């Protein structure tokens, strides 16, 4: 059962081929069998079975919602009522959320069964899932390699068939890069399309939740329930949600694909480049045309991002002070000692690094020189995308310059680690939708093809991805040992 897609599972549940309880038990057994992956921080067995039984009752009564009985899991950045929400950090190891994030509530309303909470880089800061307080997640395709980050637990869970679908978040590529490294489908929606309420903030103007699944069709099913206006989120966009599955079958004849030349230059692995070119050749067979475009300001994306994101994180994480909730140091001498030791002991090395970077960029004398300048660059990057997308339907290129690297290989070199997101970060700065789909292998590890669209064009991205998946089999492959 666990080898079926969400679409296939939904059909099987409705035709009573199996029950939600049977399906949920099968996934819970796999989670238990594959604990060595370290994909889950918390498994919610009792709750899952209770929800599965409720789903079976609804299915029997013919009162099913789109996801009724489908077992999923959430990145541990989404608040879940009565369940630990840790953000992969010692700071929140003892935090029990008192409410559900909007994404969690929407998927629950749609009938999904929650299997648990997934491992992640601490406070979503990382590109390898090695900064988690709970230890690194392993890539199912190579247990000595990282799964990508920060949504590494989410990507590994889908690749290893530990959940039918999962939620992730993307601040600078944290859905797309791990999806690429683990050979699954990951979609970062337009900023504002999915509510951020109850999603613990890293960088508020960049964070966006989205689905991670095996196929584009499954991503469409999950996004259908996740998307929509939320009055609790001031950045949520009040715009109708289209039927994402309705346009999946549209042929690609006449599709115009832009290839940013900045995505195919120095730094891109030759093996990855070959896999991407093979994917583009498949699109040409499907009737698409490819043209080169130029986006000259993309080279400034990483320096701009690593001013803006840390600046926002330094403000967002100031609330974790040892006073109201989260980790508190033992026997503080006074209030200053409480603040200093609680934050010093509760946060990991990478989080501290980014807080310090952000505080420096926002400090008197440096705000204009760094933060304001980075925001101006952000506008230039947005204009580059606007210009490119005015002449093409979508943009395509690699998700990352290499395949998944080894655990421990880059953790000691922050700059090299940051460069693994070189092709994804600009999309977040512009607020555009983008996705990663499996497009082959290099050195026996998955390669992700990135598809970038215009604002609120998720339906078009899903269509473009689905048609490719109908013509290829990369998305159907399962890591050896997890069949």
Image (tube, rainbow, N blue to C red):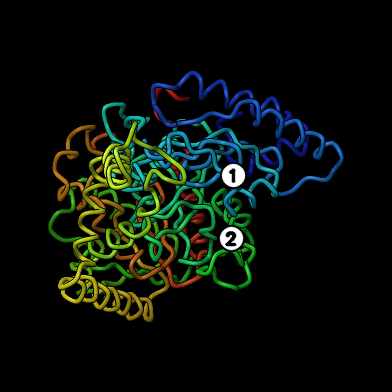
Q: Residue at x 24, y 60 (%)?
A: 358
Pick the front one: 259 or 330: 330
Q: Quadrant of residue 429?
A: bottom left
Q: Quadrant of residue 130?
A: top left
Secondary structure under tag 2 reads loop
Q: Residues within 10 Å of mark 1 (few under 14, many from 20)?
A: few
Give above or below for 354 relative to 233. Answer: above
Contact, mark 1 vs mark 2 (Cβ under 8 Å): no
Pointer 2: what residue? 227
Q: Residue at x 23, y 57 (%)?
A: 422
Secondary structure under tag 1 reads loop
Pick the front one: 311 or 406: 311
Give the percent coordinates (x, y) of residue 98. 59, 44
Pick the front one: 334 or 282: 334
Q: Quadrant of residue 310?
A: bottom left
Pointer 1: what residue? 98
Give the percent coordinates (x, y) of residue 95. 49, 38
């Amino acid at each position: 059962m666990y080898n079926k897609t969400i679409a296939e599972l939904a059909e099987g549940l409705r035709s009573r081929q199996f029950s939600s309880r049977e399906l949920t038990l099968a996934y819970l057994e796999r989670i238990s069998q594959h604990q060595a992956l370290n994909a889950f921080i918390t498994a919610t067995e009792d709750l899952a079975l209770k929800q599965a039984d409720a789903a079976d009752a609804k299915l029997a009564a013919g009162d099913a919602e789109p996801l009724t009985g489908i077992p999923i899991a959430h990145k541990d950045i989404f608040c879940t009522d009565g369940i630990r929400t840790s953000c992969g950090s010692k700071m929140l190891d003892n935090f029990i959320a008192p409410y559900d994030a909007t994404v969690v509530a929407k998927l629950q309303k749609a009938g999904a069964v929650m299997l648990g909470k997934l491992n992640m880089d601490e406070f979503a800061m990382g590109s390898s899932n090695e900064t988690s307080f709970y230890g690194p997640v392993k890539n199912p395709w190579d247990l000595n390699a990282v799964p990508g980050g920060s949504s590494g637990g989410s990507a590994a869970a889908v690749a290893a068939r530990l959940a039918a679908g999962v939620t992730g978040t993307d601040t600078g590529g944290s859905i797309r890069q791990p999806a690429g490294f683990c050979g699954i489908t990951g979609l970062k929606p337009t900023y504002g399309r999915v509510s951020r309420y109850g999603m613990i903030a890293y960088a508020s103007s960049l964070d966006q939740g989205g689905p991670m699944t095996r196929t584009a069709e499954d991503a469409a099913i999950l996004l259908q329930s996740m998307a929509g206006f939320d009055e609790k989120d001031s950045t949520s966009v009040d715009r109708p949600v289209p039927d994402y599955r309705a346009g999946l079958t549209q042929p690609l004849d006449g599709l115009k694909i832009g290839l940013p030349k900045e995505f195919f230059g120095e730094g891109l692995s030759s093996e990855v480049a070959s896999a991407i070119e093979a994917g583009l050749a498949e699109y040409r067979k499907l009737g698409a045309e490819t043209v080169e475009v130029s986006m000259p300001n993309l080279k400034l994306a990483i320096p701009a991002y690593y001013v803006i994101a840390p600046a926002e994180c330094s403000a967002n994480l100031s609330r974790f002070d040892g006073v109201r909730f989260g980790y508190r140091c033992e026997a503080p001498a006074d209030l200053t000692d409480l603040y200093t030791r609680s934050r010093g002991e509760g946060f990991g090395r990478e989080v501290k690094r980014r807080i310090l970077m952000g505080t420096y960029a926002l400090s008197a004398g440096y705000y204009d020189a760094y933060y304001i300048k980075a925001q101006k660059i952000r506008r230039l990057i947005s204009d580059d995308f606007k210009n490119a997308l005015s002449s093409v339907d979508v943009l395509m290129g690699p998700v990352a310059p290499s395949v998944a690297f080894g655990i421990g290989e880059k953790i000691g070199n922050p700059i090299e680690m940051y460069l693994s997101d070189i092709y994804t970060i600009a999309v977040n700065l512009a607020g555009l939708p983008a996705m990663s789909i499996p497009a082959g292998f290099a050195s026996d590890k998955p390669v992700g093809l990135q598809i970038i669209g215009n604002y609120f064009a998720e339906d078009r991205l899903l269509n473009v991805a689905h048609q490719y998946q109908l013509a290829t089999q990369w998305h159907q492959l399962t890591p050896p040992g997890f069949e």
